[in-house]
Image (spheres, rainbow, N blue to C red):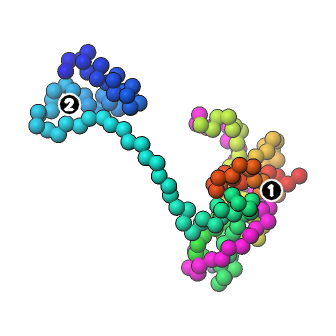
Amino acid sequence: MNEAEREKWYAYHHHKYGIPLEHLKRDYEEELSGKTTVDAPLEVPDKMEIFFKYSLGQQSRFFRELRENKKIYGARCPECGKVYCPPRSHCSLCYKPTEWIPLEGTGVITACTVQYFTTSAFIRKLPFICAYVRLDGTDFIMMTNMEVEDVSRIKVGTRVKAHFRDERHGAITDVYFRPVV
Ligand SMILES: [Zn+2]
């Protein structure tokens, strides 16, 4: 193929599949320039779309309780009494299977940062807050989505409370936290 033909080939596949031009050129320039022998395997662009589902496994109840009952559940070790949230199916200290326990949904910020820069996917959320919270009745910290109008309220030691979205999907984003007024 001459250069004009190659450019047409790239443009066609770029529009058909949405593959970036530089990727097409990187992967097919050698073939299209005629540098490959005629009997070498011919590779052509294609596209694959996959719908799939994945299991939340032994954390499933945590997400169901968020979605169905607007409740946060932790996992308690029957041996040492430590309470995990996010939950764990087994205690990482004793290796015993844990038991589910409902939590109040209140806690305290143990570490936090306010983000003023992000990728385009989150630009409308700026400034947003990443905060680790130790929920009351638990022994571990959990990364949380924090929503507040005045970011100066976000500090280590601030008391916070869980709020639930009206529309819930069985995802960690079903719940967010706000400082207790
Ligand atoms: Zn334990």
Q: Is residue 93 visible?
A: no
Q: Position of residue 96 (x, y in %)?
A: 58, 81
Task: Please give the name of the residue rendered at 79% of the width and 51% of the height, measured from the top-left corner.
Answer: 178
Q: Is residue 93 magenta?
A: yes
- Nearest the viewer among 94 and 42 is 42
Give the SS element for disc 1: strand
Q: Position of residue 29 (x, y in %)?
A: 25, 28
User: Mark 1 belongs to which amino acid?
Assistant: Val
Per the image, the residue denoted by label 2 is: 31
Of badges 2 and 1, the one in the foreground is 2
On the rendered image, what quadrant is the N terminus found in? top left
* Quadrant assignment for ligand 1: bottom right
Q: Residues within 10 Å of mark 2 (few under 14, many from 20)?
A: some
Tell me the number on the disc at residue 160.
1
Q: Which quadrant of the figure has residue 142?
A: bottom right
* Magenta stretch, residue numbers: 92-120
Q: Is residue 50 visible?
A: yes
- Nearest the viewer among 53 and 134 is 53
User: Mark 2 belongs to which amino acid?
Assistant: Glu
Task: Please give the name of the residue rendered at 67% of the width and 41% of the height, measured from the top-left corner.
Answer: 115
